[in-house]
Structures are given as C-alpha cells and as structure tokens.
Image (cartoon, rainbow, N blue to C red):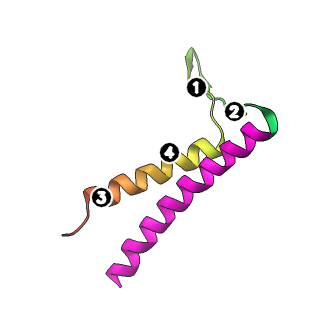
Amino acid sequence: LNLIVRNVYSLTGLSMILGGAIGNLIDRLINGKVVDFIDFSIGSFHWPAFNVADSALTVGIGIIIIKSIFKKT
C-alpha cells in the first residue's frame, strides 16, 4: 500500500506539471502569450497575476519536492 501511495503522489505531481505546461503552451499557441487572469491585491500589497496552469505547475513541483524530501530509503 505504501508503494501505491508514493506512486500516486509522483503521478499527481507529474500530471499537474505536465497539465500546467500544456495549458501555458496552448495559451502561447492561440494567443501568442500566456494569459494571466487571477490577480490578488490587499490594500497596497499586490501579488503578481497568474493563471490556473501556473498554479498547477507550482503545486505539482511542490508535491515532487516534498515527496523527495520525505522519501524513505
């Protein structure tokens, strides 16, 4: 069961990375640029705009990094 769980984390992380990369590639092919449409501001603080594909890439990379840190040898 532990092997299956580790593989699920790897598969999920890699799938999110691939999906995010494909999403940004499609944006570039169709629009000539990546369209960022999520924009957060709180008072004078402004976070850079991003999109769902960027989020998928970031979370996928995070999953892979966390999995590699806590990997059992």
Return the residue found at the far front. Answer: 29
How packed mark 1 is, by other alpha carbons closer than 10 Å (few <14, some 14-19, many 20 or more), is few
Where residue 36 is drawn, which disc sits there? Answer: 2
- Rendered location of residue 51, percent (x, y): 66, 39
Return the residue found at the far bottom. Answer: 1
Seen from the viewer's position, the closer of residues 36 and 30 is 30
Residue on which disc 1 sits = 48
SS for callout 3 = helix
- Rendered location of residue 37, percent (x, y): 72, 33
The span from disc 3 to disc 1 (Cα, nearest Å) is: 28 Å
Q: Amino acid at mark 1?
A: Pro
Q: Are marks 3 and 2 in contact (CB under 8 Å)?
A: no
Return the residue found at the far right. Answer: 30
Residue on which disc 4 sits = 58
Give the magenta range: 1-29
Q: Residue at x 72, y 37 (%)?
A: 28
17 magenta-colored: yes
Quadrant of the image for the N terminus?
bottom left
| Whether residue 63 is situated above or below residue 7 in the rendered picture | above
Label 3 vs 1, first from the N-terminus: 1
SS for callout 1 = loop
Q: Are marks 1 and 2 in contact (CB under 8 Å)?
A: yes
The span from disc 4 to disc 2 (Cα, nearest Å) is: 15 Å
How packed mark 2 is, by other alpha carbons closer than 10 Å (few <14, some 14-19, many 20 or more), is some
